[in-house]
Image (cartoon, rainbow, N blue to C red):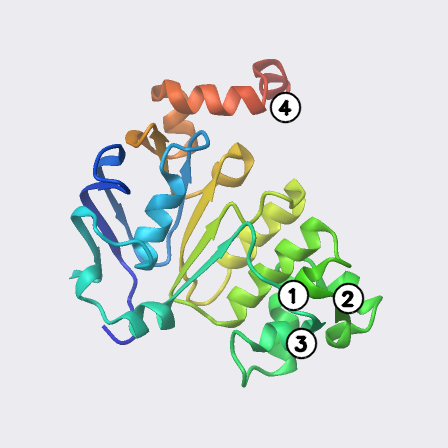
């Protein structure tokens, strides 16, 4: 497919980096186009491996990963790069201006499109008090806070208008209000990308259409936040370790 419709289907996906230790074991999931799906689990459980397999950057899986019914290993790499954008924790920021960094994603984007993306990630208000799109950035954005750098890299991804957007631990430095606002902004887009949020943070994943819970490479549960709180001990443990029961009940 040249332009993806962006249904993703994982069937019995198993993967090992070294041929010995299994990182993913028999993962199956259906991710409909335009949906927002989260992957949650403790560090080292295989979350980021799923993200890199869907991007096509990690190869050699067993089982099946299909986009619009076509096996990923049979899709042209340029088509994958054109349609899928991944933002991870340490995405690069170049010295220059905010505009320079955003235009790397889409050189012919208008200023209005750049500002729209910055508003979606709640960064435009800050930049308006600086030099707007001409605000200077040091190498790796070292003159910005961690949260501002993450917002900028997510805005750059949105400027590309990808069909599939993968946020791999890329909102970990955002405050909860900005994190929630970003998800709402993506949902309100006319034709939102199929969005994949990889996180250890329960607040980032709880409003997803479906949450996949990984535990040591195995799918320990999948469903909505409410369903998993009732049925999935691994999810309960993650959630209540971050939101103690007393606070949840009183909230």
What is the CA distance from the residue labelled 3 to the residue labelled 1? 11 Å
Q: Is residue 133 left or right of residue 184?
A: right
* Mark 1 crowd level (few <14, some 14–19, many ≥20, 10 Å Cα): many
**Mark 2 vs mark 1: which is more N-terminal?**
1
Q: Helix, strand, or loop for circle 3?
A: helix
Residue 9 percent coordinates (x, y): 22, 51
**Residue depth check, mark 3 versus mark 4: number of the one nearer the observer:** 3
Residue under circle 2? 127
What is the CA distance from the residue labelled 2 to the residue labelled 1? 9 Å
Residue under circle 3? 99
**Residue depth check, mark 2 versus mark 3: number of the one nearer the observer:** 3
* Mark 2 crowd level (few <14, some 14–19, many ≥20, 10 Å Cα): some
Q: Helix, strand, or loop for circle 1?
A: helix
* Mark 4 crowd level (few <14, some 14–19, many ≥20, 10 Å Cα): few
* Callout 2–callout 1 Cβ contact below 8 Å: yes
In-front residue for pair 102/203: 102
Q: Quadrant of residue 234?
A: top left
What is the CA distance from the residue labelled 2 to the residue labelled 3? 11 Å
Residue 120 percent coordinates (x, y): 61, 61
Quadrant for the N terminus in the image: bottom left
Residue under circle 4? 251
Q: Residue furthest top?
A: 246
**Mark 4 vs mark 1: which is more N-terminal?**
1
Quadrant for the C terminus in the image: top right
What is the CA distance from the residue labelled 3 to the residue labelled 4? 41 Å
Against 70, is 35 above or below?
above
Residue under circle 1? 118
**Mark 3 vs mark 1: which is more N-terminal?**
3
Q: Residue at x 61, y 13 (%)?
A: 246
* Callout 4–callout 2 Cβ contact below 8 Å: no
Q: Is residue 40 left or right of residue 136?
A: left
Q: Residue at x 46, y 32 (%)?
A: 43
């Amino acid at each position: 497919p040249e332009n993806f419709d962006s249904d993703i289907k994982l069937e019995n996906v198993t993967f090992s980096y070294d041929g010995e230790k299994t990182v993913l074991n028999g993962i199956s999931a259906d991710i409909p186009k335009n949906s927002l799906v989260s992957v949650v689990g403790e560090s080292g459980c295989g979350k980021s491996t799923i993200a890199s397999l869907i991007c096509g950057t990690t190869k050699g899986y067993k089982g099946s990963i299909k986009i619009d019914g076509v096996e990923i290993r049979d899709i042209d790499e340029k088509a994958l790069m054109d349609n899928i954008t991944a933002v991870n924790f340490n995405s690069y920021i170049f010295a220059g201006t905010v505009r320079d960094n955003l235009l790397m994603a889409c050189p012919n984007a208008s200023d209005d499109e750049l500002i729209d993306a910055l508003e979606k990630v709640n960064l435009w208000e800050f930049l308006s008090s600086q030099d707007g799109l001409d605000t200077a950035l040091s190498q790796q954005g070292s003159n910005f806070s961690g949260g501002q750098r993450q917002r900028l890299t997510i805005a750059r991804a949105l400027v590309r208008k990808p069909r599939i957007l993968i946020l791999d631990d890329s909102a970990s430095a955002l405050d909860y209000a900005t994190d929630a606002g970003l998800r709402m902004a993506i949902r309100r887009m006319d034709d939102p990308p199929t969005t994949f949020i990889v996180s250890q943070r329960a607040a980032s994943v709880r409003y997803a259409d479906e949450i996949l819970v990984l535990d040591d490479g195995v799918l320990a549960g999948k469903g909505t936040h409410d369903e998993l709180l009732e049925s999935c001990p691994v999810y309960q443990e993650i959630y209540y370790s971050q939101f103690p029961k007393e606070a949840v009940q009183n909230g």
